[in-house]
Image: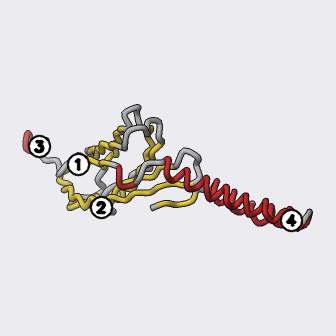
Amino acid sequence: MIRPTPRLILLTGLAAPLAAVLIVIDPNFWVGAAGYLAALAAAVLADHLASPSVHGVAVGYEAPDRLYMADEGVLAFELAFPPGNGGLILEALVDVDDRLEDIPLVATVLDAESAGALTFPLIPKRRGEMQINRLWLRWRGPLGLISKVRCDELDLICHCLLYTSDAADE
């Protein structure tokens, strides 16, 4: 999914006042306003083509199948982007159900091989079956005019159990 960034919204919003000022100065300057919009559209297209496709990202993950109360688990992701995207800033968010603590947004920078790793803490709030629903990835194009968003349905289930080995030792 491709979305405009605040930078693009600002530049697009400046088009109408710029066109009005140019036309007030001289009605023949309407070509300048049209040229501004055409240049902005070309920049958006260039930003889209220069940034990696949402379908070209390989995502692998490792998740625990069970957690114990008062312990913290780790959900780990390995990401591989197409070559030539080193230095790309990637933001990620994991959608979990209400049995897990909310997971904060994580940002990482891809290395020179266009690969990256993300880790998220899994902290249970209650016992039972916990769901890890989705992984959201977002990155901006090199010009910062668009951002691309990818959503992967995970549908992982992790069981939270009471830790009973200390009680068994007594």
Camera-nearest residue between 145 and 74: 145
Mark 4 lies on residue: 28
Residues packed near mark 2 inside 10 Å, few (<14), some (14 to 19) or many (20 plus): few
Task: Look at the picture and state if 142 lies above or below 147.
Answer: above
Q: Earlier in the sequence, mark 4 or mark 2?
A: 4
Amino acid under label 3?
Ser
* Distance in Å between CA atoms under marks 3 and 2: 35 Å
Q: Earlier in the sequence, mark 3 or mark 2?
A: 2
Q: Nearer the viewer, mark 4 or mark 1?
A: 4
Residue at (88, 68) in percent of width and height: 27
Of the 4 image quadrants, the one containing the N terminus is bottom left
* Distance in Å between CA atoms under marks 4 and 2: 53 Å
In the drawing, what numbered circle is on residue 153?
Answer: 2
Residue placed furthest toward the top: 112
In the drawing, what numbered circle is on residue 63?
Answer: 1
Residues under numbered marks 4 and 1 in contact, where contact means CB atoms less than 8 Å apart: no
Mark 3 lies on residue: 165
- Image coordinates of residue 19 in percent, x first then y, are 80, 64
Amino acid under label 2?
Glu
